[in-house]
Amino acid sequence: MTLPMRFGQGALRAVVLALLAFAIFGPLLNLVLWAFAEKWYFPNKLPLEYGFTFWQRVFSPRGNALGSLGTSIWIAVLTVVLSLAVAVPAGYALGRLKLPWRGLILLAFLLPQAVPNLPVYVNIAQVFYRIGLAGTIPGVVLVHASHGLVLAVWIASAAFASVDGSLEEAARNMGASAWTCFRTITLPLAAPGLMASAIFVFLESVDEFTGTYFVGVPDVTTLPLLMFNASMGGNYQIASITALLLLVPSIGFMLVVERFLKADVLAMVGR
Amino acid sequence: MATLADDAVVAARPGGERRWVALALVVPALAVVGVFFVAPLVLSAVGAFRTSGGAFTLAHFAKALDLYGRDLVFTIAIVVLSTALIAVVAIAIAGYLTLGEHPRAVALLRWLYRWPLFIPFVVAGQIMRTFLAKNGMLNHVLIGTGLIEPISAQSMLDWRGIVVAFVWKQAPFVTLLLAGAMAAIERQHIEAARNLGAPRLRVLVDIVLPQVRGTLLVGLVLSFVTMLSVLSVPLMINPNSPTMITVDIAYRINTFSDYAVANALCLLSLLLAAFGAAFYLRHAVRSAAS
């Protein structure tokens, strides 16, 4: 390769990477600007004044953000507990045990990922309304968990499947009971994968919008709903600040995802 | 310490009984999916075909197609276009991550592409709502660099905004899956082709892509189905007609409590998804069986 060609290639590479960086960070930067803009109207390229007035409003006792944050976290914690309580046994059975109708059962756990969720939310909201679960936290948790547990089952079964069976056999041969073996060998080895599934379910619950929009109204306002209402009401500052709050767990998890989900577990997901 | 006794019980337990234990462990999770996912789905299908008296009818579909037929076409166009763009972006990025020969550029790209990975749709909607507006940063940058005249700056908050938001949010997910699958390919295949003088694009198309087709398909179908049922993005970026049928479904329910037409629309979106899901499930079952 000649030197000018190599230079041209390097320049092209830099331009493409810069464009990609703008495509990814431009929208995020725009959001940050809105979160700190006191005054910003057409045709000004940048906000006229920056400040924390809207942050004070969001976090004041009269603002709804702290309440919504609390609601979101409480719902997410309950969703994780419920999802893992049913997903860990199921994941163990799918990953390690001989299971009759395994293909069919896996298919059932693929369903919520392969089917549009809107019809489900619309109709479950109607049923919940009739039995008094609409607009309640348990109602929202059930909706979040029915979706979250699917991911949890997948990841848990992959995590259990990647545990080396010979270690368990060794423990059993030395006289450990099935339960002791599970508790001291299998569970600790699968723990990073289970942790990942817990984080996935938590994140999915915190970010969930559509289900909460139909089932949570009018009394359960999670952070995404607060953000949506502010945005539709034309209050871009409040919406952007709430959006920033929602970005913290999303981006944090993106940065550490590979520490929890090793390639061998990722490779087993959905198998 | 009853370990020896436990052991004896387990050892003596016939194989058939242990299979029932395994089944019992799965039943609670299956029950949750059945009651809170499958049952509402069945209700949706039933509701779409029932008159208020309980008789069978196709009137809801007629009404849905009459009122929202245009939106149905609009929805298909947006989701298909977005899926195609996601495929192009994901193949390009994952391909460069696998075949790129400039280690620093590869590392930078790996760090860069995944930022929107876990950002929820509702936040992506808000982000694009400001970024793509007439007064948004995109227009200011285009004007500032002299690419467009200030007079021709226009809002992209229509079908283009929805597509941009979908691709921005969903392409990293498919890229992550695809890059993972590409990394698992035997390097020898790639290196052999490179040594024989094949250009990288040919290696990507002829050697790498055929081996990761399954993963690409799964990622694209999952994205396709997800985008079909996203409500927040079209609601925030382009709520006026023509819009996506998710917005129409919410409108029928919130404004008229008209579950019948809403369910007919739901069933139409299920039909669209079934088209993609058929591919996906076939692949999933095949790899589950192997």
Image (cartoon, coloured by chain):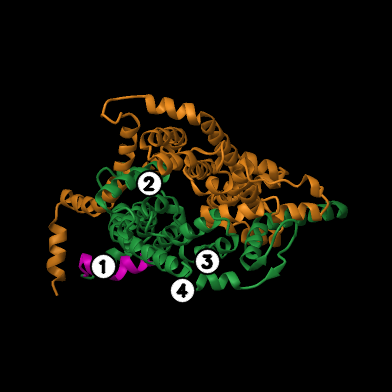
Chain colours: A green, B orange
Whether tag 1 and tag 2 are in contact, CB under 8 A, the answer is no
- Report the disc number at residue A245: 3
Residue A41 part of the magenta segment = no
Tell me if residue B3 comes above or below residue B13 in the rendering: below
Quick one: label 3 or label 1, which is nearer the N terminus? 1
Q: Amino acid at mark 3?
A: Leu
Residue B170 location, x and y as percent? Answer: 55, 49
Amino acid marked by disc 2: Tyr
Which of the chains bears the disc numbered 2? A
User: For the residue labelled by badge 4, is the local secondary structure a helix, a strand or a loop?
Assistant: loop
The amino acid marked with disc number 1 is Cys
Along the line of sight, which residue is nearer the eye, B74 or A235? A235
SS label for mark 3: helix
Disc 3 packing (10 Å; few <14; some 14–19; many ≥20): some
Q: Dot 1 lies on which element?
A: helix
* CA separation in Å, label 1 and label 2: 41 Å
Q: Left of B279 or right of it: where is B186?
A: right
Q: Residue at left 37%, top 40%?
A: B257
- Quick check: B100 left or right of A197? right
Q: Which residues are magenta?
A: A176-191
Q: Residue at x 58, y 69 (%)?
A: A54
Residue position marked by numbered label 1 in the rendering: A181
Q: Position of residue A131 (x, y in %)?
A: 25, 50
Residue A178 is a magenta residue: yes
Instruction: Relative to A187, say whether A121 is above or below.
Output: above
Dot label at residue A121: 2
